[in-house]
Structures are given as structure tokens and as C-alpha cells.
């Protein structure tokens, strides 16, 4: 099928298709960071509780994580073009809904829908690149994809601060969602005109029950962390979390039942016997728990604790994002020669960056945004050294026949980690802020980040030992 699709699209046209799908990926990437910068302003305008602030980010990630494998399967069944168009238009409509939300609760529901539509859109991007670029141009296409992915973070921080500050047509924070509407419509129109149709893949089926059970389990497990502060950490919250754990155990049993019945479970169950892969997933989970939550806590501390305006706070992240891009560009080649040692070094560099942040904010009452930006470069370099080659390291022991399923499990684990980090570390920040100060909450969060990244490094070393023995 790869050769058939490639022959249908001439060389110049497929670069146009690349531009379309990468633009959609860029829009998705920008959305992840632009909301972080606007969160403090959203909280004030909608009178949102700490739980609602965290949920605006976490519920989006949970919806995306639980449905992204299903989104990929839908692309196989109905064709990548059709599902991509549905995802882009759905993302556009739900972005409009987010911008029109009148309460914290409504915004959370809209973000849930937005995450679900992103799960339709994003899997088709990599699928399209795999289908169209099967020759020597593939490495160039994926290089462009990687650069755009990295630059989305810098663009999100800058655009978020800029839109909130200029208050475009009186829309304030709402413009960070409205900006997706014209972009989404242009991407959808261009895709309709030049994106090739791909025939469905025979034999592909959906595991809807698995998706629903996984979503319910994650919501029960992570939801109480989001709302614990608002309800005084009532005893029933722990009961709900226990139910969530039980549902996740039931999910694994359900997947085995689906496989025995001849269906296609969400996860390839043979991967659960790959010790190196499972340890790699553990490393990825702890790395991502300390990923998006870092940007949330850093944004909240700068705007709420240091009273730095949104634009200046957003711009403070740009050097970090650029350092991440540069480190990512060089980490792949280094990882090929030195293996997981490079990733462990990246973890240590991140911890050094966190220590530098603790020193600067501990000894200076009101550090300038430029000083914070310079210090965060250390963290950004470390993060780039880890994130870019991490997926390749985790998937290195997986057999080619299971590569697609393993990639889906990796992506799902990453987003679950992001959601869990936003919930758990966000809850810790708000709890300590309420008892003492935003600065104290920031220091507790930095300690948590350092511990999580240390655990990630330990899992990487463990994975390396297992791989060496096999």
C-alpha cells in the first residue's frame, strides 16, 4: 500500500501534504503550551478553583492519551485523509467552544472534547509521513517534522503571552483558543484539496470497550488528585482512586479477553513480556510526569508569586525552548554512539538546571525574567537530550511486527505521565501555596521534579542492564 500511495502523489505535491500535516501538528503543539501561559489569567476571569485550573490541562491529556490509539486505528479503517479532516474540523470547533466557555466547568468539558478530537488528528500526521515518504527523502521529511515540533513550544509560550497582553478585540485569554479557528479551517481546506485518499486496511478493528475502560480508570485515579484540595482531601477520594486502580487491573484482563476472542486489543499483550521495553516505559512515565507539570508550576510561580506579566513570563521560556530544539538536533547522533548514557546525562543536566533555579529564586527575592530565562536554558538542554532519543531507546528491543502497537503504548504512557504530573505536582503546589506561599510551593515542586527525573535515570540504567543481558 505504501508504494501505491507514493506513486499516486508526485514529488512536489507530497511536500505540500507534508506542510499541511506538519501545520496541524504545530497547531497541536502550540496549543499544549499556549494554555499554560494563559492559565493564571483564565483562573482569575472564570473564578476557577485550583482543581479546575489543573483539570483544564489534565483532562485534555487524559482524553488524548486514552483515544490516540483508537484514532490511529480509525485512520486505518476509514483512511487517513478522512479521519484527519474529521480531527482538524473537530479540533477547530472545540477550540471555538473553549474560547466561548463561561465557567471553569464548561471549559473543562470543552477541553475534554478538544483532547478527543486531537486524538483523531495527530496519529494521521505520522501515518501520512510513513505512507508518502518511503525513499531517501524520508529522513529529511522527519527532520522537518522534528524541528517544527520543537519550535511549537517556543511559539506557544510567545503567542500565549502576546495574545493575553494585547487583549485582541477585548477577547483576553479567549484568543489563545480562537487562534486555532482560522488556522484549522485553512488546514482543513488545504487537506481536502491536495491530501491523497488512502484505502482502508483490511482486518483492522476497534477496541471501544478497552478505550472506555482505560479512560474511566485513569479518570478515577487522577481525578481525585485534581479535586483533592477543593474538598479537603476527603476520605472518599482515596476510595475513588482505589476504584481507578481496580479498573486498570480489569482493563488488562479485558484486553486478554479481547485477544482470546480474536479481536484487536488496544495494546499488544506480547509486549508485556519484554522486560527492557517495560522498564523503558517506566522511564518515559517518570520523565513525562516532570515534563508539562514543570511548565505549569513555573508559569504559576512567575505570574502569581513573582507578579511577572504574562508576556514577560511567556518570553522567559523561549530560550529554554530554543535550547531544547538545539539539544534535540544533536542528541540523536550522540545516542546512536553512546546509547542510554546520553539520556542519563540529560537527566543529570535537568537536575542541575532545577538546582540552579532553586539557588536563584532562593537568594533573590524578585529575579528578573531574563535571569530566569538564562537559568532555564540548562533545564531545556537536559530535556532535549532526553526527550528526542527516548522513544527510540524505549522501542529499541521491540520486534518490527509490534512497532506500531509499541509506539502507541509509548505515546499513551507519555500523555498519562503528563496528566498525572499536572494533577499531582499541581496539587502539591497549590496546597503548599495555600499554607505558606507560592515560593514555598515552587521549592516543593522543584524537589519533586528532581526526584522524578532521578527515578527516570534509574529506570534507564535498569533498562540498559536488561538489554545488555538479552
Image (cartoon, rainbow, N blue to C red):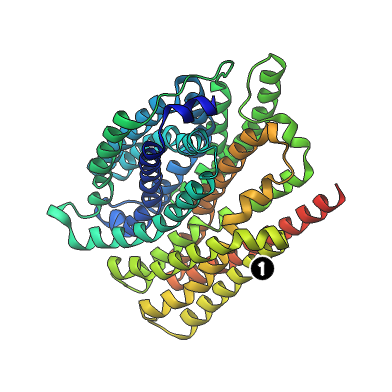
Rendered residue at 23%/42% (across/down): 182
Question: Which sits in the foreground, 261 or 445?
Answer: 261
Q: Position of residue 1 (x, y in %)?
A: 54, 24
| 368 left or right, relative to 337 | left
Q: Residue furthest top?
A: 261
Residue 148 sits above or below residue 60 on the image: below
Q: Position of residue 176 (x, y in %)?
A: 27, 51
Viewer-closest of 106 and 224: 106
Q: Point out residue 33 in the picture as x, y percentages from the top left corner.
A: 39, 55
Q: How many marks?
A: 1
Decide if residue 447 is in sight here: yes
Q: Is residue 79 left or right of residue 416?
A: left
Residue, x 66% and y 68% (percent of image)?
345
The answer to whether 470 is drawn above or below residue 351 in the figure is above
SS of the residue under disc 1:
helix
Kindly indicate the quadrant of the structure image that contains residue 98.
top left
Nearest the eye: 467 or 229: 467
Residue highlighted by disc 1: 345
Q: Residue at x 63, y 53 (%)?
A: 390
Q: Position of residue 13 (x, y in %)?
A: 36, 36
| Residue sitting at the far bottom | 363
Report which quarter residue 242 is drawn in: top right
Amino acid at each position: 500500500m505504501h508504494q501505491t500511495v507514493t506513486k499516486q502523489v508526485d514529488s512536489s505535491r507530497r511536500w505540500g501534504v507534508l506542510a499541511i500535516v506538519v501545520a496541524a501538528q504545530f497547531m497541536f503543539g502550540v496549543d499544549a503550551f499556549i494554555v499554560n501561559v494563559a492559565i493564571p489569567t483564565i483562573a482569575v476571569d472564570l473564578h476557577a478553583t485550583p482543581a479546575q485550573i489543573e483539570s483544564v490541562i489534565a483532562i485534555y491529556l487524559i482524553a488524548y492519551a486514552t483515544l490516540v490509539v483508537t484514532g490511529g486505528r480509525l485512520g486505518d479503517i476509514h483512511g487517513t485523509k478522512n479521519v484527519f479532516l474529521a480531527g482538524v474540523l473537530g479540533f477547530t470547533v472545540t477550540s471555538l467552544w473553549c474560547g466561548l466557555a463561561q465557567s471553569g466547568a464548561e471549559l473543562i468539558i470543552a477541553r475534554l472534547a478538544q483532547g478527543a478530537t486531537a486524538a483523531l488528528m495527530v496519529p494521521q500526521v505520522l501515518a501520512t509521513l510513513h505512507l508518502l515518504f518511503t525513499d531517501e527523502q524520508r529522513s529529511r521529511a522527519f527532520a522537518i517534522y522534528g524541528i517544527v515540533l520543537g519550535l511549537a513550544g517556543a511559539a506557544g509560550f510567545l503567542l500565549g503571552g502576546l495574545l493575553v497582553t494585547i487583549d485582541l478585540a477585548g477577547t483576553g485569554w479567549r484568543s489563545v483558543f480562537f487562534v486555532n479557528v482560522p488556522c484549522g479551517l485553512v488546514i482543513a481546506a488545504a487537506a481536502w484539496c491536495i491530501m491523497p485518499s488512502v484505502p482502508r486496511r483490511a482486518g483492522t478493528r476497534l477496541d471501544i470497550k478497552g478505550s472506555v475502560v482505560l479512560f474511566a480508570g485513569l479518570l478515577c485515579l487522577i481525578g481525585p488528585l485534581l479535586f483533592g484540595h477543593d474538598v479537603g482531601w476527603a476520605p472518599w477520594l482515596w476510595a475513588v482512586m482505589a476504584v481507578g486502580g481496580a479498573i486498570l487491573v480489569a482493563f488488562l484482563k479485558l484486553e486478554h479477553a479481547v485477544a482470546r476472542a480474536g479481536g484487536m486489543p488496544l495494546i499488544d499483550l506480547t509486549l508485556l513480556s519484554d522486560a527492557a521495553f517495560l522498564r523503558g516505559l517506566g522511564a518515559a512515565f517518570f520523565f513525562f510526569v516532570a515534563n508539562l507539570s514543570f511548565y505549569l508550576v513555573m508559569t504559576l510561580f512567575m505570574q502569581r508569586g513573582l507578579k511577572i506579566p504574562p508576556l514577560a513570563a511567556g518570553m522567559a521560556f523561549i530560550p529554554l525552548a530554543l535550547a531544547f530544539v538545539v539539544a534535540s538536533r544533536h542528541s540523536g547522533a550522540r545516542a546512536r554512539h553512546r546509547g542510554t548514557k546520553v539520556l542519563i546525562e540529560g537527566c543529570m543536566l535537568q537536575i542541575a538546571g532545577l538546582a540552579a533555579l532553586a539557588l536563584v529564586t532562593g537568594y533573590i527575592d524578585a529575579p528578573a525574567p531574563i535571569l530566569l530565562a538564562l537559568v532555564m536554558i540548562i533545564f531545556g538542554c537536559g530535556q532535549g537530550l532526553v526527550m528526542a532519543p527516548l522513544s527510540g531507546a524505549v522501542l529499541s528491543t521491540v520486534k518490527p511486527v509490534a512497532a506500531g502497537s509499541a509506539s502507541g503504548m509509548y505515546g499513551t504512557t507519555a500523555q498519562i505521565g503528563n496528566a498525572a504530573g499536572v494533577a499531582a505536582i499541581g496539587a502539591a503546589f497549590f496546597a503548599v501555596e495555600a499554607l505558606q506561599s507560592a515560593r514555598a510551593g515552587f521549592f516543593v515542586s522543584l524537589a519533586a521534579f528532581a526526584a522524578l527525573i532521578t527515578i527516570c535515570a534509574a529506570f534507564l540504567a535498569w533498562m540498559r542492564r536488561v538489554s545488555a543481558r538479552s
